[in-house]
Image (cartoon, grey):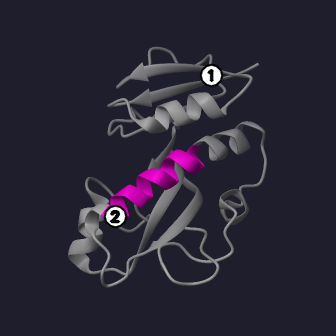
Amino acid sequence: MKKIAIIYSDYTPTVDAIIHYLHGVDVVCFKNKIEADDNFDLIVGIDIENYENKNILTVHHSLLPAFEGYEPVKKAFMEGVKVTGITFYYTNPKRIIAQYPVLISNGTDFVDVENELKYLEQTLYPVIIEKVLNNQIIDLKSILGKTGCSSCGGCSNCKK
């Protein structure tokens, strides 16, 4: 049986989504710091800032390398960008394994973008983890079942 560790700073719905999605995987949760990492097939991070030079699969609410660090959505809005998104990556060494864009239209509210990124995190992160554990290719468009963009609100391809 595969075994993963989840390290989180605050308990979020993403933790629940991961636990409930991964059938047949032993999941152990740690708040802020992992006690021992040699017994896990994968270590997953959610909203943690200190990785202690460990290779952790984590998520960031921007299309890295843009807007690294704290409050990336706020930084994106302040810069006036029209595309942000979500990035799944390993921390040490930093390796991006998947990204998904989110368009920011002129009337888009900051809270709406944050909520969409949280939704994408809860939806995609468990699937990304499963694909990594099974050494499978990650195709986010097929995972989401979308053929179009995100956040346009008007095209016939969106499933909103």
Q: What amino acid is labelled 2 in the image?
A: Asp
User: The magenta stretch spans which residues?
Assistant: 112-125
Q: Which mark is residue 86?
A: none
At a point 71% along the width and 55% down the height, the residue shown is 138
Q: Where is residue 49, by image quadrant?
A: top left
Is residue 155 shown left or right of residue 86? right
At a point 26% along the width and 73% down the height, the residue shown is 77
Circle 1: element type = loop
Is residue 73 shown left or right of residue 39? left
**Residue 19 percent across, percent down from the top left:** 58, 28
Is residue 24 shown left or right of residue 124? right
Residue occupied by mark 1? 40
For label 1, count other residues whose C-alpha is less than 10 Å away and answer few (under 14), some (14-19) or many (20+).
some
- Toward the left, the furthest residue is 78
Residue occupied by mark 2? 112
**Residue 125 percent across, percent down from the top left:** 57, 45
Q: Is residue 124 magenta?
A: yes
Visible in this render: residue 61?
Answer: no
Image quadrant where one finds the N terminus: top right
**Residue 65 percent across, percent down from the top left:** 42, 65
State the residue in front, 121 or 50. 121
